[in-house]
Amino acid sequence: MLGQDHTILAGLAADQKLALLPAMATRHGLITGATGTGKTITLQTLAEGFSEMGVPVFLADIKGDLSGLAKAGQPKGKIASRIDELQLPQLGYVNKGFPVAFWDVFAEQGLPLRATISDLGPLLLGRLLKLNSVQSALLHSVFRIADDHGWLLLDLKDLQSLLAHLSENEALYRSSYGNLPKQSLGAIQRGLLELEAQGAAQFFGEPALALSDLLLTDAWGHGVINILEAQRLANHAPKTYACLLLWLLSKLFEDLPECGDLPKPKLVFFFDEAHLLFDHAEAALLEKIEQVVRLIRSRGVALFFISQSPADIPDSVLGQLQNRVQHALRAFTPKERKAVKCAAEAFRPNPALDTSRTIEELGVGMALVSFLDEKGVPRMVEKAAIIPPQSQAGPLENAELTQIIQQSPLQECYAKTLDRYSAYEMLAEKAQIPAPKPRTKAQDPDPLEAILGSFAKKAGQQLTNQIARNIGRKLARGILGTLFGGKGSR
Ligand SMILES: Nc1ncnc2c1ncn2[C@@H]1O[C@H](COP(=O)(O)OP(=O)(O)OP(=O)(O)O)[C@@H](O)[C@H]1O
Ligand SMILES: [Mg+2]
């Protein structure tokens, strides 16, 4: 909820209100704590605060417990007791819902969220396909060949057909691009098949997400909270989940203009289960993540990482997350004791508080909190009761969710898949092979694919736009130094 002077009131300590200053939000944040200690509730409260002050939010809902943000809360149990105990109505606490847009790569629990292969770029795609260094280098060459020949890589079949073409016609490209070993091309093709088997193919294609659609406010000036339904994605295709979030970050960095220090951020990103971003990330990728976390501040984007222990986050990233909420941690094993010690040492000490001991003793919904002050200096750590959300804690009913998705003003732009003239069709023409007839419904269970034909007329006109956009993007990447696209490769 909003506090005085347009700050976000997050918690109440014995003798003070703990508020997050919006001007300091781009110094990023961290919410940690053991299972069930109140991390998601804290995230929900902060997301509401940003929305109330007109800042759009993007968050990944890993456990499916955040859709309630759309609906006014009906407090019961621990949450009702907390509201009474803190006498929150006297501070202006009222139950209310927030403007929410739901997104889902699988198009089941939200509007389909898509990116093109070309947008994703060879580095992230290489990671997604678990390529080794030789295969990754080859994928960079494949992107360059596509760029040089104007073959648009939009969806998986574009890339698949290009790989097949290169495999058959390697000799034609050798003098300009070096060897394109069949075996490595085959490994990339197999990776793509695996990705398809995970159901991730739907993520690639058009209409791709336009960033401007994540930056909306409603008629009352509240920031829209974009919820990515990520349960299925994070559990079944965790690499795709991590890549999607990293792609979004790099896109924000590339597309948003540089800005000085702002009174409030332009967008706030919450990464639940943040360890998934770093698990098995090779050194080159980790370096890029650190870079993006550091640089994205200059675009007015604030990042909050949520994980069980600060030890889940690499030190170089951890050091950049300066607004901190630490819920309880257990300390049974030596490793856990070390994690508690590290978590405690990260705070500016408070002489009135034994930080390590308090971390172990905190009750549910209680936390150690330290936000930055007006000068950007961390405040002394305080023990606080976190203010519960004003919206519903826990998920919406399915019918409620469906209604919100169907009524979304974005429905018209994103609901239907668009399959434009791109590398697949271009290469089919080149080989003078007639493009296969659209697949029948029985062959292809994806209902969205059934609508492909209706966009055929638009294709010619949009192709011109796309080429112009791609050239612009290529130049921009050259100037900015691509973060994830692989410099000079596209
Ligand atoms: N600030 C709070 N005030 C009152 N009750 C709370 C608060 N935070 C959490 N709770 C209670 O604790 C429960 C668990 O909280 P929450 O889901 O946020 O935990 P979590 O740390 O995200 O757990 P997990 O690691 O399993 O995702 C909530 O459903 C709620 O009943
Ligand atoms: Mg949680």
Image (cartoon, helix red, strand yellow):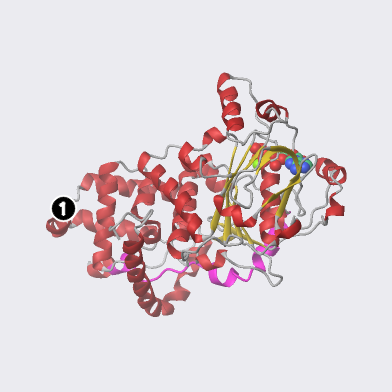
Residue 17 appears anywhere in the view: yes
Query: On the picture, is 294 further left or further right than 464?
Result: right
Q: Toward the viewer: 122 or 183?
A: 122
Q: Toward the viewer: 268 or 241?
A: 268
Query: On the picture, is 436 further left or further right than 368?
Result: left
Secondary structure under badge 1?
Answer: loop
Q: Position of residue 77 (x, y in %)?
A: 84, 41
Q: Toward the viewer: 394 or 327?
A: 327
Residue at 24 percent across and 55 percent down: it is 141
Relative to 214, residue 322 above or below:
above
**Which residue has dot 1 on it?**
178
Q: Position of residue 443 (x, y in %)?
A: 45, 58
Q: Quadrant of the C terminus?
A: bottom left
Ligand 2 visible in quadrant: top right
Residue 432 appears anywhere in the view: no
Magenta span includes 217:
no
State the extent of the magenta-drawn residues as a range. 397-426
Magenta span includes 412:
yes
Count all numbered tags in the image, as a single digit.
1
Relative to 215, residue 242 above or below:
above
The picture quadrant where one finds residue 234 is top right
Query: On the picture, is 138 further left or further right than 238?
Result: left
Residue at 63 percent across and 44 percent down: it is 63
Residue at 76 percent across and 57 percent down: it is 4
> Disc 1 residue type?
Gly
Q: Residues within 10 Å of mark 1 (few under 14, many from 20)?
A: few
Q: Position of residue 398 (x, y in %)?
A: 70, 55
| Mark 1 Cβ inside 8 Å of ligand 2 | no
The picture quadrant where one finds residue 286 is top left
